[in-house]
Amino acid sequence: MAVKVLVVDDSGFFRRRVSEILSADPTIQVVGTATNGKEAIDQALSLKPDVITMDYEMPMMDGITAVRHIMQRCPTPVLMFSSLTHEGARVTLDALDAGAVDYLPKNFEDISRNPEKVKQLLCEKVHTISRSNRRLSSYAAPTPQPVSHTQPSVSSLGSSPAPRPAAPARAVSAASPAPKRKPYKLVAIGTSTGGPVALQRVLTQLPANFPAPIVLIQHMPAAFTKAFAERLDKLCKISVKEAEDGDMLRPGLALLAPGGKQMMVDGRGAVKILPGDERLNYKPCVDITFGSAAKSYGDKVLSVVLTGMGADGREGARLLKQGGSTVWAQDEASCVIYGMPMAIVKANLADAVYSLDEIGKHLVEACV
């Protein structure tokens, strides 16, 4: 059965271009178009598409407001189009908070100068997010507030968490036991699609005095990671920054791998930032950071693989396991895309499988 898509954009040229690309795929059907957020809501309710592609800047109602309404009234996977700028990153992160699943640059030349590659990527994104868990639950509008790092204690999370899906009715699998406490020298977290909201949910649960250094690997463009790190830093009690070459790992600090590059760690606690290798699909790549952590810290790494498509992180997790380190995976029910964690579980590499809301709590329990 074809994936039904609603295309939303105030530019007639862009609507036609996206519609033509998608319609050329026999497994995708463009069932309608809309020129603003209000039309998008009406069309989503009447057409019940499997996926919505959404612009941000539109008359009458912007894309983020439309996404919030759609998630509350008829939860549907949304693919946002954004500009690869700092402001575009901020807007896209707001859209992901509102419930959008993934994003692509609106200027297709930012993706590739090869039209066939653009078509392939757009169609692949649509197919992948059509299978996401976004349709299973409604989203509440987020009301995050920044946390002051100068305050010694903040009640609860210091803010409302990122939008929280209501738990859908489903069979509950046997839960992994609570983690054993261990003097970990590093916590390494890898993620992709759905990761920005997932990382926010996990990291806002950690106290300012969290005892282990943290490295974060999120598949994200170069223009986005600085804005994302700044966002997390405002919302979390721990400190978060985009990693730079020579940064030192320290407790209570999370270093986010810069987009378009690779991040490695060494036994002295120093971070090495390398150019992105064109032979690698992911820049940053979870496998590379996990692999360097396995080499540098032996059995003293607690690694976590969160929501995301593909299998990045599996081979790095294999190296960590061989060295005696611990590997956790996010459970299927709480993933936006159960790809990367599934690869860990299917390879029998997971020491524990936890829901997204359990992971932050268990990180606090596990690290001494």
Image (cartoon, rainbow, N blue to C red):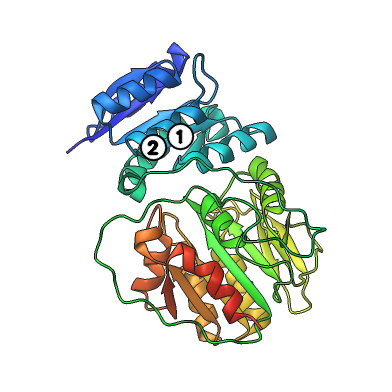
Label 1 crowd bin: few (<14), some (14–19), many (20+), radius 10 Å: many
Residue 133 vs residue 327, the one in the foreground: 133
| Quarter-of-image position of residue 7 | top left
Q: Going 68% across and 68% down the picture, which residue do you hit?
A: 207
Q: CA distance from mark 1 to mark 2?
A: 6 Å
Q: Where in the figure is residue 230, as x and y percent of width and height? A: 72, 48
Whether pointer 1 and pointer 2 mark residues with C-beta atoms closer than 8 Å, the reply is yes
The quarter of the picture where residue 217 lies is bottom right
Q: Which mark is residue 68?
A: 1
Compared to residue 248, the image places residue 14 above or below, namely above
Residue at the disc numbered 2 = 72
Q: Which mark is residue 249?
A: none
Q: In the picture provided, is 284 more to the left or to the right than 15? A: right
Decide: is 144 above or below 153: above
Q: Position of residue 41 (x, y in %)?
A: 37, 25
- Residue at position x 32%, y 44% in the image: 135
Q: Find numbered disc 2 in the image and state the secondary structure of the residue it sits on.
A: helix
